[in-house]
Amino acid sequence: MAYEEPGFTIVLETEGYEIRLYDQRLVVQAISENEDNTFMKLFRYISGANSQSQKIAMTIPVTQFSENSNSYMQFYLPETFNEETAPIPEDASLQIQMIESGYFAAIRYSGRPNERNFLRYSELLKNALIEGGVTIIGPPIMATYDGPFTLPMFRRNEALFQVEWQN
């Protein structure tokens, strides 16, 4: 089954990573100080725990990052929604957030989307960007594309950084 992904244009492709210009996109996000049940909160939202009791199609990737001692997990909303039409979460700890258009560097890897793999690849990407003279302007982001039943060798994961980019 094909899932909707946020739109982007590749502006630079190297042997190790890409720099992408992502379109503006809408997410529902959970913020926590400890890795509590954020995935289930988000899953309940798209399963109908929202102001319209509406089931919302799953999209990919699921993104996670940490900033200022908080952990963020985000589900992208289908493009059919905008800030006015997105159902309000029943769980007040969830937020609908617009992610503005921007440049992101991405490195792809397979395997389990665990902290060890993510740290390894985000460090590889960080070093390649520094070596290439690209300025990083955000924390490392883990993007997970496949469900838990996908064999590790077939999983698609990415580490991303928001970057400054001049064409």
Image (tube, helix red, strand yellow):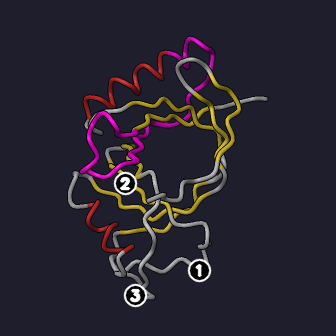
Which residue sits furthest top?
131
Q: What amino acid is labelled 1 in the image?
A: Thr
- The answer to which of marks 3 and 1 sits earlier in the sequence is 3
The magenta segment: 128-156
Q: Residues within 10 Å of mark 2 (few under 14, many from 20)?
A: many
Write the residue at 65% across / 46% down: 8
Q: Give the labeled residue for mark 1.
A: 85
Tag shown at residue 33? none
Residue 138 vs residue 5, the one in the foreground: 5
Q: Give the labeled residue for mark 2.
A: 73
Q: What amino acid is labelled 2 in the image?
A: Met
- The answer to which of marks 3 and 2 sits earlier in the sequence is 3
**What secondary structure is the magenta-colored segment mainly?**
loop
Residue 145 highlighted magenta (yes or no): yes
For residue 87, above or below residue 115: below
Determine the secondary structure under disc 3.
loop
For residue 15, above or below residue 27: above
Percent coordinates x, y for residue 21 in the rendering: 67, 41
Separation of marks 3 and 1 at Cα, in angstroms? 13 Å
Separation of marks 1 and 2 at Cα, in angstroms? 21 Å
Q: Which quadrant of the view contains residue 109?
A: top left
Percent coordinates x, y for residue 123 in the rendering: 40, 22
Tag shown at residue 53? 3
